[in-house]
Amino acid sequence: MEQSHRSHHKPSAGNKHAKKDAAQGIDRTGGKGFNPKAFTNTSFRAADRAARRTAEKDQRRLHVPLVNRNPEERKVTSAKGQGMDEGKLPPPPIVVGIVGPPGVGKSTLLRSLVRRYTKHNLNQPQGPITVVSGKTRRITFIECGNDLNSMIDLGKVVDLVLLMIDGSFGFEMETFEFLNILQSHGFPKVIGLLTHLDLIKKASTLKDTKKRLKHRFWTEIYQGAKLFSLSGVMNGRYPDAEINLLSRFISVMKFRPLVFRNQHPYLLADRIQDMTPRELIRENLKIDRTITLYGYLRGPNLPPRNAKIHIPGAGDLEVKNVERLSDPCPLPTLESERRRKMGEKAKLIHAPMSDVGGVMYDKDAVYINVPGSFTKGGDAPQGEGEKMVMDLQDANRTFADGIQNSEIRLFGHSSAPLEVSQQQRVRRAAAPRSGGPMLGSAEDEEYDSAEDGEDFEDEDGEAMVDGLDDESEEEEGDVRYAESDSDNDDLEFATGFEQDGKIVNIDDEDVDGEENDDIEDDDDDEEEDDEDVPQWKRNLSDRAATSFAERMGKRRDLMSLIYNSELSPEEIAAGKTRPSSADAESSRMAQGDDLFQVSKEENKGDEGDQLKEPVDDEALKAKWDDEEMLNSLKEMFISGPVGEVDAEGNPYEEDGEGFEDLEDGDENEEDGDGVPYVGVKPSAGDSGVDHETARAQAAAKKQAALKAKFDEQYDNDSDEDGDMMDFYDQQKNEMAKQRQLNEDEFQGIDIDARAQIEGYRSGMYVRLEITEVPCEMIEHFDPRFPIIVGGLLAAEERFGYLTVRIKRHRWFTRTLKTNNPIIFSLGWRRFQSLPIYHLDDHSIRNRLLKYTPEHMHCYATFYGPVSAPNTGFCAFNSLTDDSPGFRVSATGVVLDIDRSTKIVKKLKLTGTPYKIFKNTAFIKDMFNSALEVAKFEGANIKTVSGIRGQVKKAQSKPDGAFRATFEDKILMRDIVFLRAWYSIEPKKLYNPVCSLLLADKGDWRGMRLTGQIRRDEGIKTPLDINSAYKPIERTTRRFNTLKVPRKLEASLPYASKTKAVAPQKKPTYLQSRAVVMTDEEKKAVTLLQQIQTLKKDKVARRKEKQEERRKEHRKKVGVVDEKLQAKLKEEKKERFKMEGLKRKREEAAAEGKYGKKRTRD
Amino acid sequence: MTTQAGPSRDILRFTTHRHLRQRLLLSILSGKSIRVDGIRSDDVHVGLRDYEINLLRLAEKVTNGSTIEISVTGTSFLFHPGLLPGGNYTHTCHIGRSIGYYLELLIPLAPFCKKPFEINLYGVTGEEGRDMSVDMIRTVTLPHLHLFGVTDGLELQIKKRGSAPLGGGQAIFKCPVVRTLKTVQFLEKGKIRKIRGVAYSTRVSPQFANRMVEAARSILNRYIPDIYLITDVYKGDDSGKSPGYGLTLLSQSTTSSLHSSETLSVPNQTQTPEDIALKAARLLLEEISTGGCVDSKHQWLIALLMALGKEDVSKVRMGKLTAHSVQFFRDMMLFFGTKYKLVENSQTGEVDVSCIGIGYSNVNKSMA
């Protein structure tokens, strides 16, 4: 029976309603606002419960605040013009890994998701696939193969894992292995997906299975972890409704930064290219290659120069060159996205390894495979003309946009690029502008706001007539820009502007989208500045300052002097801008305006490594004897005059730093060489207008400072009020502040210069050029295996001994043995090393352990690349698929790094006494020479019986013998031993797992275990005969009888005489008598005997009976058992059969039926 | 196979003895090996000086796993840096340079040791014209470290003073360990609110110190009343082997920015204490006039610690850059690949130095 639900009531709140209310002037607050009394609890109990609930909620909210190194996601708000902060670097796409055993439906899911986001049907999804999932977010999907190497590598970079579980089969070992890998490298978010549930026919079984799997999943992740179930496959995809639901979950997922990823820049390469000249490869097939890798940067900034990286599976490499490319999969722009829904055009996909739509991107070219006439998505080659036409299809920017973003300069020395001002779009006259050669001027503020307002209206209309507005808006665009005009496109082509996010490369690619963005940024900044000052007035002082500075020729680009010129440091410090021709003249000149002498760089003498600079005493004295000079410093002191005094002696309103604001104003108008103009305080000789402007600005600045101060105070006060979250909120505030600073500091510098200073930021799409890559990486490249570029910190290139806390995994069946090679996955790296296990012995020493303890942590020390303490790792005995059982053998965390180790093992030296005096004994056989004894003089020794002693001095005669003293007399048969400690160094083995370089990626073989080698080589375990256990024979000790000489016996006093008594010779009284019974006694004895006999008989019979019953019972049980055994056997048979089938299918799938929909019976 | 065990492949090469200490320092911090060639090849006395060899020995002493190979002629050496274990050390410095010369290497290293660092240094405590005296290090350098969160347990004790040329002084330097340095924003230089100073004398009349204080006050009194110069006269065993005297001055602003100067007596030159004090005071004024929030002799230290911070922007306003700092910026580029953003104010000559930290964390510090 269909149950009728109550329908939802119509929404009465939200943006739409707020807008409507605002338009109609309705105030729904009831004129009073929020009434806190209205919602208080009436009963004490409820209040208490509510309070506790809030407290708990507050506590749950608390996590250790972590800085997020990725750029923040944009915020889409309904407010027009400020919602999508374009120009800002968007965060990199979220990496979503699809993980599961083979045949579980990973490719199907990937296809379904890609189809859901982009309407593309991928036949063969391979490698990372980036799609735009919404206005704020992009997603990179990657399928993870079933081999352990891929799982380890991907586990280190994915943000979200879609863990697929075959519902009809249950969890497989790989799933648990993967979860354990995740656990040791920082746990990303996990969503479970149950598939093949359609194979379970019975509803109740299905329910039970789901419940069972869910609970198992929860114990592994956390209680209440999300577990989806996907029903059957339709048209090679999962049902749209379920995929929609899943995509919603993905799109709202929030991520917490992981510590390791917050410290290391990394990149998931979505494209690899071999750049080695063909000729060189022809000459030598095995030559080291130069490759380029492409991908979105993540984590902290990648150093711009010689960044050290590790590619898991390929080894440590160095990035020769980093280049920022335009985003191949950009987020929709505000321009194109005025609607609530994302336009179809913006639903981009970037999957170079999958060959989507036949488009391939390269540094200097875009390859398009055109199958038919001008349609995308084929393989046929194309001519130049065709290509051009194809490019035109991709144009999504207009000519005006291109020009606006261009970098054409009218003259070589022009400071700003030519710009088409936005006036073309204006329907009103722009505000008057008073003179000045302002090429790179700011946008008109008023105009913009007017347009915004208009847009707002547009949008309103849109919201109501949702479907229609699409065309109308585009039409509008057509009218304005003549979007699809081929002339414009030609020009764009010629100027090398961006089209559809790709570079149409003419000769260099500096003319890039990002620069343009920056210019826009600057303009925006300026707009946001003071609003009250009219446009023409705004830049007056700046311009004046600039021109003044230029006139004076004072402007010095310190950075280029230091980093790009050949000038000696002394010359730079002396303020020179051009290298001297080594003549004394110029150095004297430099000396002229400074007290400090410019010392010439010489390769002799003691100078050149000192902080204090040589001072010219006379000049110093002359300078600071001058009264004016002395007075000029007064303002630097707290007691000095307040405020700055200008040339006329009028004090400024601002104190001390009048030039500051000018400079700040300047910074917005930089032309990209990285150094802002340095403003100069306008002198009184300049026009009065300048002075006034400066004054006004000073006032404005002062006001702003005061406001900031007030805000700060006010905020602090409010913090103190809510003192519960004080520390937490404070930390978060600090982080936010620092983040803002990080963003602002390099704002407005040209993009390349900026990257040179701060490195390449997270979210950029970059191309890394890497040299000296082993040729096998290219030769055996397989897109199914992910290529990850992990940045290394300065310390991580070094090698040393790592001490880690380690615990054997409780599912790993064997114990781990010292000096057996195991494979560590630590940091980015996977490598084999030889660990030594040890334990802390009474905090005195680290004592070697032969084996890891059963259920306990212990320490391990091994040689390997340095990793920061507190880094987690997991270890494996073997990475191959053929190893049975659970493969994660141990997990742990790095504790300490050093160049030497202090692990010891116990060493017992034994010796025997050869001569014993009272408390002194001479011991031999412990040492071999007197020198050895000398080393151990004063060492503690002990006998087996526990008598303690000390080594005294070596004896000359038998080599290695020594005199020792004991606390008591020892016996000749006592063994004397000396407890010593022998230090052990771990063996230096670092064997990186180079799985990516193999033709068969899963078949990496490292150093074998000793036992494995013996097994493989058929060598028997060497057996030292002395180590063999033999039965211990303990002969009974025989004591000699004590014989006292007769003479002595005679002389002893009676008490001390031996009390030997001779044995009795005659029989005792009882022995010599016979017993005769009376009749009565005889009778009684017979009766007793009879009773005994009867009882014995009874017991025997009872036993017999019992045995009979038992026999019967055994028979019965035997039948049942037989049945059970038969049943078990049947079940076993069935299971093996299923497994065999499954394996066969897998093999079939591996043999090239990859991606084909599999059938199940 | 591209990866190999052992020390990293690249060795940075330098020539001449110039800036030897900063290269040694950066080498230890970055873990990159260095090779310096052509040391004083134009000099009559070719090769490394004794005090430089002494410095190399000190570097070897405070690190674990370092190797130094010095060529026969002493004109080149190869240095493979090790890790910093920390702990207690004693070192007798060569009297060719003062203790400050050695401390300038040790101070930036000390916070990155495994255990708290403590070293007992014997030698010359102060020398005119080349290195900072222990007084200046104690009163100026250590407060600069406070900016970066190196505070608790940071101290320099001057046990004995020993003037050049024979020395005989003793100083104990103690430093705590840190995991990461704080990010610094220091742009407000503020106004100078007090001037402090130390006038010391060894093996000369104690009046010398008082005379220096008087003379310094004659210049500085016009600016600020809060001037407090202490006289520090060491006697007997604590006063070292040679006569000497000197004055260290420092000014502190409302935002705790420090500027300092010092002048010490030069052996075998007749200088009145007044001369010395006046020169020190004038140098302080000169230093103040260069502006900035940090002392010019500590620009390199601040720049280094900024770069070694977290991956956040640090920004500090410095006075006119010294030649030493300029070379230091260049060397930072080589060792750490750090490029600073330098914005010079052409009017005041002050330079805003900003950079992003490289996320250097103290890997030596053990977890447990």
Image: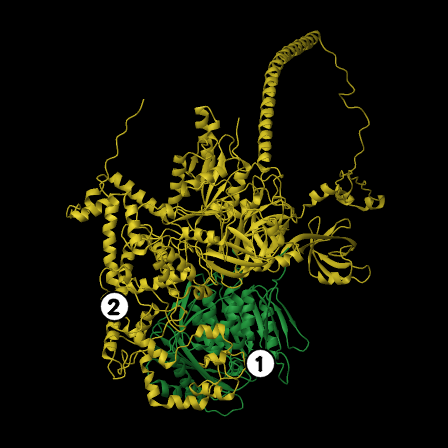
Chain colours: A yellow, B green
| Residue at numbered disc 2 | A535
Q: Position of residue A303 (x, y in %)?
A: 49, 62
Would you identify the image quadrant in which residue A987 lies? bottom right
Q: Which dot, 2 or 1, sits closer to the camera?
A: 2
Q: Position of residue A735 (x, y in %)?
A: 38, 58
Q: Chain of mark 1?
A: B
Q: Which residue type carries mark 2?
A: Gln
Q: Chain of mark 2?
A: A
Q: Which residue type carries mark 1?
A: Ile
| Residue at numbered disc 1 | B95
| A872 lies left or right of A241 | right
Badge 2 element: helix
Which of these two is toward me, B72 or A324?
A324
Badge 1 element: loop
Q: Position of residue B157 (x, y in %)?
A: 49, 74
Q: Residue at x 69, y 7 (%)?
A: A1083
Q: Quadrant of the N terminus of chain A?
A: top left
* Residue B5 in view of the camera: no
Q: Is residue A1136 above or below residue B301?
A: above
